[in-house]
Amino acid sequence: MNNTARVLNGVEIAAQIKAEVADEARALAAAGITPGLAVVLVGHVAASEIYVRSKVKASAELGIRSEMLTPPDSITTDEMLALIAELNARDDVDGILIQLPLPKHVDTRRLLEAVSPQKDVDGFHPINAGRLLSGMPALQPCTPGGIMEILRRSGLPVAGQHAVVLGRSDIVGKPVAMMLLNASATVTVCHSKTVNIKRYTRDADILVAAIGRPGFVTAEMVKPGATLIDVGINRLTDAAEVARFFPGDETRAAQFVARGSTLVGDIHPAAFELAGAYTPVPKGVGALTIAMLMHNTVKAAKARRGMAGHPPAATKA
Ligand code: GUN
């Protein structure tokens, strides 16, 4: 690894944001308000259970009241709609998070649309998506919001930069493209049907990879000095693959032996060597998601009571 690429430490930035959220929660508590988050976890998806536990734990640490609702896998769309209506109506619930993915038999879009836009701490409701599109204040999706905070708090320029986003998901690709555009970047969105992706990535000043393919972005696809933002979290369980991605990296090899797996992002580690700055995996973008959820919960608690929430600076034009 060369010495010039700057590591953007997601854990440190997440800690800053969490400290700010805890301060805000304390100020609200002094006014007799405890922000409340309801997390709905349907059935038993192992990864979702881990995420949800982390969300509940972070809430407790920051002075946010949280509750977990765990309906069974067999719950119907109508029953979920009734549950959401109840949470919408409760005054002690400021944020509602429906953990995804949901079982196939429930209508996910209908449910996300049923969450009150004021309590939509995931920023997935079409009203919030539309507000983001229009550059209006909104509850914004957590991972894209976290990416903007990394750029902003690291002092990396966005206005006038060519930002290339790989992936067009509703959760990351599309909203981060919109946020970058609102921050005056020139934005290109590439996806599975893009012809000759390298042509775009090589011109990127900021490259955001959110496609879920281990090491997809190779060194030859990157402009030297670029800012690389890696949203991918891919678990490697094959020793040969670990050796291919991390040749000569003894720390990784030891970790793999101890745990039976290691994580790699959507950007090949060799590409990081060319970067001006990059987010590592782990301890990069992933660390921000929960911090931004906490931020959104406090923001929703304030906004619902007519108190000015601080607007997300990253979306200022
Ligand atoms: N599943 C994976 N990521 C997310 C997220 O950001 N929000 C929700 N609700 N579910 C998820």
Image: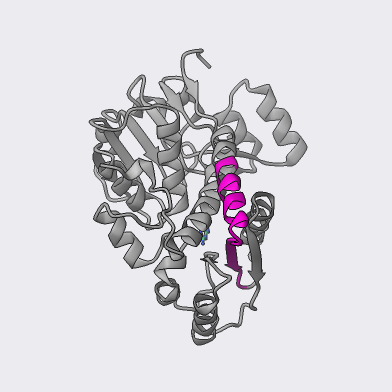
Q: Is residue 274 magenta?
A: no
Q: Position of residue 269 (x, y in %)?
A: 51, 28
Identify the residue at image location x=63%, y=65%. 45
Provide residue 10's location: percent of width, then percent of height. 54, 35
Image spot of residue 168 (x, y percent): 34, 52
- Residue at (67, 41) in percent of width and height: 261
Q: Residue furthest right?
A: 258
Colour pattern: one colour
Q: How many marks?
A: 0
Q: Residue 41's quadrant in the figure?
A: bottom right
* Residue 41 forms part of the magenta stretch: yes
Residue at image position (25%, 42%) is: 317
The one of 188 and 131 positioned closer to us in this rendering = 131
Nearer to me, 284 or 219? 284
Residue 34 vertical placement versus 218 (above, below): below
Query: Is there any visible trace of residue 313 in the rendered image?
Result: yes
Residue 203 horizontal side relative to residue 1, left or right: left
Q: Nearer the viewer, residue 160 or 92?
A: 92
Looking at the picture, does residue 117 appear above or below residue 186? below
Give the magenta part as a residue range: 19-42
Q: Is residue 271 visible?
A: no
Report x, y in % for residue 56: 66, 58
